Amino acid sequence: MGSSSNQTTARVHVWDLPVRIFHWSLVAAVVTAITTAEIGGDWMELHGKAGLAIIGLLAFRITWGVVGSTHARFANFAPTPAKIRSYLAGRWQGVGHNPLGALAVFGLLGLLAAQAATGLFSSDDIAFSGPLFSFVDQSVADRLTGYHHWLSNVLFALLGLHVGAILFYAVVKRNNLVIPMLTGWTVAHSPKPARKGSVFALILSIAIAAVAVYGAGSAGAAVHAPAAVPAPVASETATAVPAPAASATRTTAAW
């Protein structure tokens, strides 16, 4: 096997702008959802909006992961058994997510999708009902609410591992993973040519995200919209009430 010293390194634009905007928007939405859920009360309305934002962001990322730029596509960093073995043996030299990091990415996206989906049907019986709560029976809603709460504990654990891995790479391996997600650039050995995502792919991803948010939010709004109250119809047998007559003893103005 050739020595790594024979390999060239180059500065690579690994994370495009759509991926970076998605990443930090997802961070903001998840932090908002967690914080508002802990506070509760009137903040649950914002919690629901954060959940809808997460659904839109996930719909965007899934679409962009199929039709977007080279390094954004899931097929480019899917954690196959061969890649995992190569990484554990110290032979992996790809660009972007390493195989174990890719496992974490897929796990986090899947968990957030399940968390957001169960939240659509959840209710705390006090201050919050998901936008699709009325579409299921109470027993189903209660079960999904339980899943939603249980998955939040799994989410905390996975987020902790994610942050811990970032700190490990920064302190032990001297590899700051945050900077590439801010600037988009990294250094890699013998990087392969990559292509940018097309404008059509970006528009398609945004459109699908918008449809996902609108579909989830508007369906619930239509169900929860108050019914029009018909104007009262005057009864044909109602007796007209005469206006009160002026009092005969009213004091008149003095001349």
Image (cartoon, rainbow, N blue to C red):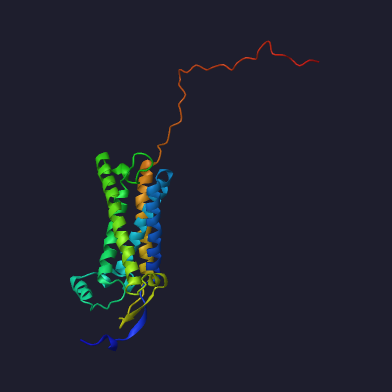
Query: Hey, which residue is sitting farthest front in the picture?
Result: 172
Point 40% across, 63% down: residue: 24
Point 41% across, 59% down: residue: 28
Above or below, 140 against 72 in this view is: above
Numbered label tally: 0
Q: Residue 152 location in percent, x, y? A: 30, 52
Query: Hey, which residue is sitting farthest top in the picture?
Result: 249
Query: Hey, which residue is sitting farthest bottom in the picture?
Result: 6
Q: Residue 133 location in percent, x, y? A: 32, 44
Point 47% across, 24% down: residue: 234
Front-most of residues 6 and 165: 165
Quadrant location of residue 201?
bottom left
The answer to whether residue 211 shows anywhere in this view is: no
The answer to whether residue 119 shows anywhere in this view is: yes
* Quadrant that contains the N terminus: bottom left
Q: Residue 42 location in percent, x, y? A: 43, 44
Q: Determine whether, in the image, residue 46 is placed left or right of residue 138.
A: right
Above or below, 41 against 176 in this view is: above
Front-most of residues 132 and 39: 39
Q: Residue 255 location in percent, x, y? A: 81, 15
Q: Determine whether, in the image, residue 248 is placed left or right of residue 31.
A: right
Front-most of residues 129 and 161: 161
Q: Determine whether, in the image, residue 28 is placed left or right of residue 118.
A: right
Above or below, 73 against 1 in this view is: above
Above or below, 180 against 237 in this view is: below
